[in-house]
């Protein structure tokens, strides 16, 4: 985690500090190494949010595009008591999850059920082949910024994120940031919209939309 509570304030990890997890109130220890993203780790056990993935520069870069008070917001299900920490939750209660590691479609669904009003931002640079393949398999964007693509090969990138919630994939500065509008599991054809990251951040922050009117890659 980027933030923990120290004397009631949200603070970032600094060498040798101990603090309190804002979600479970357990003790957390600052992990500050030369080759890691400085973060807080629970001292006594595994992370209280079992969906939490270890943070990379990519996660931090994305979270930091939003105000700090929207980053890492604990959420508890009133009925079940289940606890998770939203990567970003805007003032308009839109949750944005930044996801780098692959997760099972069942877990995708669980997270969507838990957060409700949410969108996914996926790290498309994790697998080198994906971004090059995407560039090679898509048409140039039309005047509305929409590209068609035909997915070949073994990568399950698009079948893993075949969901009804909005999905954006960050293929990096050279290959762009795309909203996956549709993907057909049988034909492996899809539609993607080229997005500008700062425009996306502005729109997501504005509260004007939760992006749900267009649905997700699996919508019809
Ligand atoms: Zn905790």
Image (cartoon, rainbow, N blue to C red):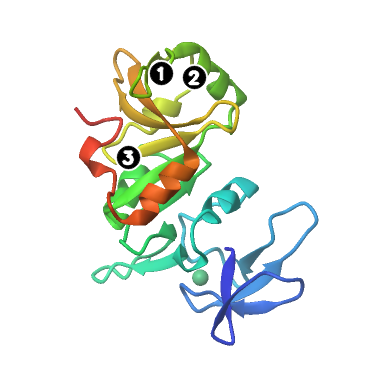
Image x and y of residue 85, in percent: 44, 63
Mark 2 neighbour density, 10 Å: few (under 14) some (14–19) many (20 or more): some
Among numbered discs 2 and 1, the one appearing first in the sequence: 2
Please give the name of the residue rendered at 25% of the width and 43% of the height, measured from the top-left corner: 212
In the picture as drawn, the residue positioned furthest to the left comes out as: 220
Kindly identify the residue that appears in the image at 30 percent across and 12 percent down: 187
Residue 99: percent from left, percent from top: 48, 44
Please name whichever residue, 160 or 150, is drawn nearer the observer in this view of the structure.
150
* Residue annotated with mark 1: 141
**Residue matched to label 2:** 134
Q: Which of the pair 72/211 is nearer the observer?
A: 211
Residue 54 visible somewhere in the drawing: no
Q: Is residue 196 visible?
A: yes
Pick the front one: 70 or 154: 70
SS for dot 3 = loop
The residue beneath circle 3 is 166
From what the image shows, is residue 147 above or below residue 37? Answer: above
The numbered mark, 3 or 2, whose residue comes first in the sequence reads 2
Helix, strand, or loop for circle 2? helix
Ligand 1 within 8 Å of disc 1? The answer is no
Mark 3 to mark 1 CA distance (whole Å): 19 Å
Note whether ligand 1 is within 8 Å of mark 2.
no
Position of 31 compared to 150: left or right?
Answer: right
* Residue occupying the far right of the picture: 34
């Amino acid at each position: 985690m980027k933030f923990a509570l120290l004397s009631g304030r949200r603070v970032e990890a600094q060498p040798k500090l101990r603090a309190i997890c804002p979600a479970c109130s357990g003790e957390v220890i600052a992990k500050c190494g030369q080759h890691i993203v400085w973060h807080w780790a629970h001292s006594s056990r595994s992370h209280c949010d079992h969906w939490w993935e270890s943070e990379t520069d990519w996660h931090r870069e994305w979270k930091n595009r939003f105000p700090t008070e929207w980053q890492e917001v604990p959420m508890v299900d009133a009925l079940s008591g289940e606890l998770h920490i939203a990567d970003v939750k805007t003032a308009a209660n839109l949750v944005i999850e930044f996801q780098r590691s692959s997760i099972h479609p069942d877990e995708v669904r669980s997270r969507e059920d838990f957060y409700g009003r949410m969108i996914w931002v996926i790290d498309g640079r994790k697998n080198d082949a994906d971004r090059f393949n995407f560039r090679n398999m898509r048409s140039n964007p039309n005047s509305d910024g929409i590209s068609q693509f035909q997915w070949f090969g073994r990568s399950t990138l698009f079948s893993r994120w075949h969901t009804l919630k909005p999905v954006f994939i960050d293929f990096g500065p050279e290959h762009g940031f795309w909203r996956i509008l549709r993907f057909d599991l049988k034909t492996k054809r899809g539609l993607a919209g080229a997005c500008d990251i700062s425009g996306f951040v502005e729109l997501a922050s504005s509260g004007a939309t939760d992006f749900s009117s267009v649905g997700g890659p699996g919508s019809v």
